[in-house]
Image (cartoon, rainbow, N blue to C red):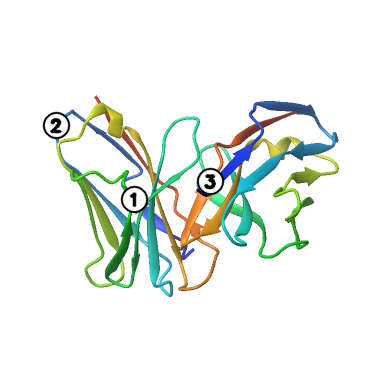
Amino acid sequence: GNSVTQMEGPVTLSEEAFLTINCTYTATGYPSLFWYVQYPGEGLQLLLKATKADDKGSNKGFEATYRKETTSFHLEKGSVQVSDSAVYFCALSRDDKIIFGKGTRLHILP
Amino acid sequence: DTGVSQDPRHKITKRGQNVTFRCDPISEHNRLYWYRQTLGQGPEFLTYFQNEAQLEKSRLLSDRFSAERPKGSFSTLEIQRTEQGDSAMYLCASSFENFYEQYFGPGTRLTVT
């Protein structure tokens, strides 16, 4: 079946550190891939997306590349800020629905 | 702001009571989705509508759950005879048909005591 696996948190980093959150997926065909972010007390927001192999999604300094050969979509940011503290969800779109990973909580220390 | 809205934001109810939630999608979107998110988990798909037609229901949606979208605009999700296991955040999302991006509302947090 279709599923998403992402690294468990919480992940704690100092401000300006490099961030990687790993995500791998299992799916039939070629799904679209997403990263959603949930800030404290707020709803889910789409952070970035990629719709085909080798596409790179980017937004707010975050990037992720759709790697078909490794079925991965790792989230990266070169220099995190305290305001990036949130829960990040990797997800795929298949058969008109979105399938989410369990989420990774990120804490950024000043 | 014309994003997805949900009402109420919080609901506390006693086991066995019925509850109903409302979702107002982005007005131009013809698809509307319901998801459930429990603590420490990602959202899980429950059901979705295209206009007023309910096209798919997850096996997570037991007989106690019913969703409607009578005029193809807002939607309601009703849970009858609530159980403690129904405690969760209920999320609504909307999209254009054939568009992958779904836009989420703030959710309704249900607590069953």
CB contact under 8 Å: marks 3 and 2:
no
Task: Please give left or right for residue A39 compared with residue A78 in the image.
Answer: left
Mark 3 or 2: the one toward you = 3
The image quadrant that residue B11 belongs to is top left
What is the chain identity of the residue bearing mark 3?
A: A
Judging by the rendered image, the residue that carries numbered circle 3 is A100
What is the chain identity of the residue bearing mark 1?
A: B
Judging by the rendered image, the residue that carries numbered circle 2 is B16
Q: Is residue A110 visible?
A: no
Task: Please give left or right for residue A44 compared with residue B30 in the image.
Answer: right
The amino acid type of the residue labelled 3 equals: Phe
To the question of a shared chain for discs 3 and 2, the answer is: no
Q: Nearer the viewer, residue B17 or A20?
A: A20
Q: Which residue: 78% across, 38% down?
A: A20
CB contact under 8 Å: marks 3 and 1:
no
Q: Is residue A107 above or below residue A88?
A: above
Q: Residues within 10 Å of mark 3 (few under 14, many from 20)?
A: many
Q: Which residue: 31% across, 69% down?
A: B73
Q: Is residue B88 above or below residue A25?
A: above
Residue A44 screen position, x and y as percent:
53, 48
C-alpha distance separating marks 1 and 2: 22 Å
To the question of a shared chain for discs 3 and 1, the answer is: no
Judging by the rendered image, the residue that carries numbered circle 1 is B58
Q: Is residue B2 visible?
A: yes
